[in-house]
Amino acid sequence: GEIDTVRNLLARHPFFSVGLAFIIGLIFGGILQARASQFTILSLLGGFPLAIVYGHSQGIPTLLSMFSVIAIDGFVSYALLKLMRILDESPRIQPYLDKIKVRYGDSSRLFMTQSGSLGVQGALAVCTFLIGWWIAVIIAYLMDLDTKPAMIGIFTGLLAGGLLSWSI
């Protein structure tokens, strides 16, 4: 039953299985207090300030911490965008996700029509910069954006946040 469903899902989507192993490794590494896992968790939850301060306390140069946060948050953003596409195909979860998309679909289409692709990417960059990578992933999913334009916007916002944190 359920085990076969999970096995088939992981076999069809190997990138998802790698991402799942990454998250599980972070959780266990955080429990075991591994420094790399703690840095990664701080990066995901607190963004640049927490990760850079923690990295500095561990002797990691600020510039390396900044690029590490960009890489970690970018990887997780990409993995979540792909995961949301996988969940869209699941017959059990699809009705719930469709309700959410229908609720915000009209305003999303209006925004995409009025602002164009570059405007949407700019909005994702601003959201990533001001709020965080996770809200940009949610917005990209609700707007039904392809992965490439969504990641361009998210990466631009991460880069802007990293440069600001580095300059401070």
Image (cartoon, rainbow, N blue to C red):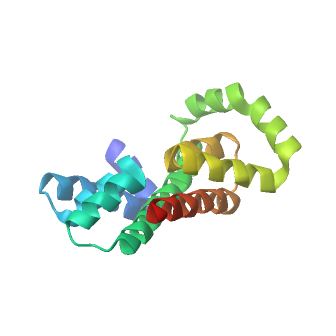
Query: In the picture shown, does residue 83 fall above or below 103?
Result: below
Q: Position of residue 24 (x, y in %)?
A: 27, 55
Query: In the picture shown, does residue 131 fall above or below 119?
Result: above
Pick whichever, 74 or 89, lies toward us: 74
The answer to whether residue 13 is visible is no
Quadrant including the N terminus: top left
Q: Position of residue 142 (x, y in %)?
A: 65, 39
Pick whichever, 161 or 155, lies toward us: 161
Quadrant including the C terminus: bottom left
Q: Is residue 113 left or right of residue 106?
A: right
In percent of the image, x 88 and y 42: which residue is there? 114
Quadrant assignment, res 48: bottom left
Q: Is residue 156 left or right of residue 59?
A: right
Query: In the picture shown, does residue 27 fall above or below 156?
Result: above
In percent of the image, x 13 and y 57: which residue is there? 33
Quadrant assignment, res 67: bottom left
Q: Is residue 142 left or right of residue 119?
A: left
In percent of the image, x 55 and y 64: which residue is there? 159
- The residue furthest front is 168
The answer to whether residue 161 is visible is yes
Q: Position of residue 44 (x, y in %)?
A: 38, 52
Counting every numbered tag in the picture gives 0
Q: Is residue 122 left or right of residue 48?
A: right
Pick whichever, 90 or 140, lies toward us: 140
Q: Position of residue 90 (x, y in %)?
A: 53, 42
